[in-house]
Amino acid sequence: MVSLPRLASLLTTRLATLKPALKPATHLASLGAQVIAELVPGIRMSPNRRRILPANMGAGFIGAEIAMWWALSPSLLPKPWWVTAANLAVLQAVGHAAATGIHSILPRTNRRVSRKIYNATHIATGAITLTTTVVGLIRHRTQIRLIGQKNFGPKETIAGISVGTLGYGALLITGELTQHSINEVKLLIERFLPPWISFIAAVSVITLTTLTLADRVLLRRILHNSAIQAAHLNRMVFPGTEQPWEPERSGSPWSYEKWGAVGSQGRAVLSGGPRKDDIITVTRLSDTETHEPIRIFIGMVPGRSLSDQVDLVIHEMRRTGALRRDHIVINNSTGTGWITDWSAHTFEFLTGGNCVTISMQYSYLPSALSWYKDNDGPINAARMLIDAVLHELDQLPTGSRPKLFLAGESLGAYGLAEVWGDVEKLLGTADGVLLSGAPRFSDAMNALRTRRDASSSERLPVIDSGRHIRFAGEPEHLDMPATWQFPRMIVAQHASDPIVWWNAELFIRRPEWLKTPKQDHQDVFPRLRWMPFVTGWQVALDLFTSTSVPGGHGHNYHEEFIDYWAALLDREVTPELRHSIAYWIRANHIKR
């Protein structure tokens, strides 16, 4: 039985090794004869025909097929075709390399016995590959149903398998070229050094050359181009955004902050969101019970330091009368200055507009590049802003101070969690905290999870019986036997969010979050298994699709914010109000 990995790798390797001087017809004849000879060992080639593939290539094919079984296993999110292709290509190549290495150190057996074992193994692995392919398609369909994805189907998965198998063949060719380069360099070095030293030196030379080229030619160029693109996006005006004319908003004609200084994400924040009339329509509150929400956003411009930005925030607070409102929320933004509409808009609806939303931009780069360039940026911005606002609140009499809330998603949540190096200390400065999608590299968040009650899992940790802090993958997880006391903190983390769960240790160590009760899986396949390298690679690929899934899954935290803010604000939300708020946010979302 011939499997896709064997067939594709044979074809690609043969094409790479055929002599270019041959005519096309000779090319095809040579290619066909050699592939048939490899696939069907009983058929003899002409005595003059030289075998080009190494004798241990068959072991590599078996390793690639075994790797394919794991590559088709589910991870956190359904895979579009290009993710399936990348997943399959790399894992088959790794399996091929591992099996080839194992084969090279095994003792040699009788050739006839070896050939029988070879044939039997290929038949067995081919049959298992066919079975795992069918099972993989079924499991993938289950994953799609779990998150409500509608644009995936078996055709896309099959296309990914086909392209990935061809990619595996291309990686084999690359490996052969690398080996050839090492051999050539080794021959040159052997003129001056012993063979064993020359081999190490040759590998070092090729590795260093490759890494240097990758860094200077590829990585630096990508980072440079990404920075240019990010700067361009920061100057854009998204469709549907326009300068606000409410004095309660930064960027308005009455504001100390110029409309052109807040960046594209800041313009979306200041232009969007409900006004007083919208709040009355959606919540059915009276005119006297409703206020025009205050929104303060300060942008990052050349020559303006974080201290300057914080000073502008305070000036805007005083200008708009922010300290006379009952609720203030500091939204720590992501790298580009983005804050989620679902959180900001919901806060304004549930407070009747009697609130202030404060945020500022500390970078214009996407979160990953922003963290790579300056991983202290979101922490410093959050700390300075919180300290400045607390200083203003301390000037007021104790009984007349607004309630202070802290909110952040993704890199914004990371910045808040790391402000004092201890997440629980946030409760000492605020009346409520809402963190969503905090990245796995947050040391403070990891430390909080390790302090969980012994009977709870890492996916849904319980901290001190849930008296102040509650983790939730969905709103139902907020319900606990213990009385929920104020101040309250909610940590939202979807079971299917790879940004919450991925780190480099996944390649070599089974994580605690896989050892979890079935009810904690929520929206992921319930029988995920860990495999060295495989799990780390698959979840790393999930990072690229984490925001392209429906709301409430992956790294998209949407409608659940209504329930989370209702719990922090101690508000009752009827199903009708919940539906009305969600409908308004979807209908008035600014695409960015």
Image (cartoon, helix red, strand yellow):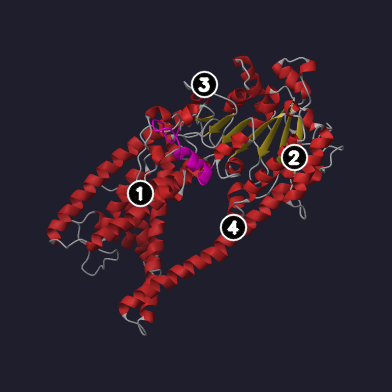
Q: Earlier in the sequence, mark 1 or mark 2?
A: 2
Place of residue 473 in the rendered image (x, y in percent of width and height, measured from the top left): 50, 30
The image position of residue 91, as x and y in percent, is 38, 50
Q: Which residue is at a point 51% across and 67% down the rendered structure image? A: 212
Q: Which residue is mark 2?
A: 297
Query: Mark 1 or mark 4: which comes first in sequence?
Result: 4
Which secondary structure lies at badge 1? loop
**Magenta span contains residue 384:** no
- Residue 237 shown left or right of residue 543 in the figure: right
3D distance between C-alphas at marks 3 and 1: 42 Å
Q: Nearer the viewer, residue 299 or 120?
A: 299
Check disc 3 and give the amino acid type: Thr
In space, the residues marked 4 and 2 are separated at their CA atoms by: 30 Å
C-alpha distance separating marks 1 and 2: 45 Å
**Mark closer to the chain start, 4 or 3:** 4
Residue at (74% x, 48% y) in the render = 235
Quadrant in the rendering for residue 512: top left
Q: Which residue lies under the disc numbered 1?
A: 532
* CB under 8 Å between discs 1 and 4: no
Ranked by sequence position, the earlier of labels 2 and 3 is: 2
Q: Residues within 10 Å of mark 4 (few under 14, many from 20)?
A: few
Question: For this view, does 92 lie left or right of residue 451?
Answer: left
Q: Which residues are magenta?
A: 439-460
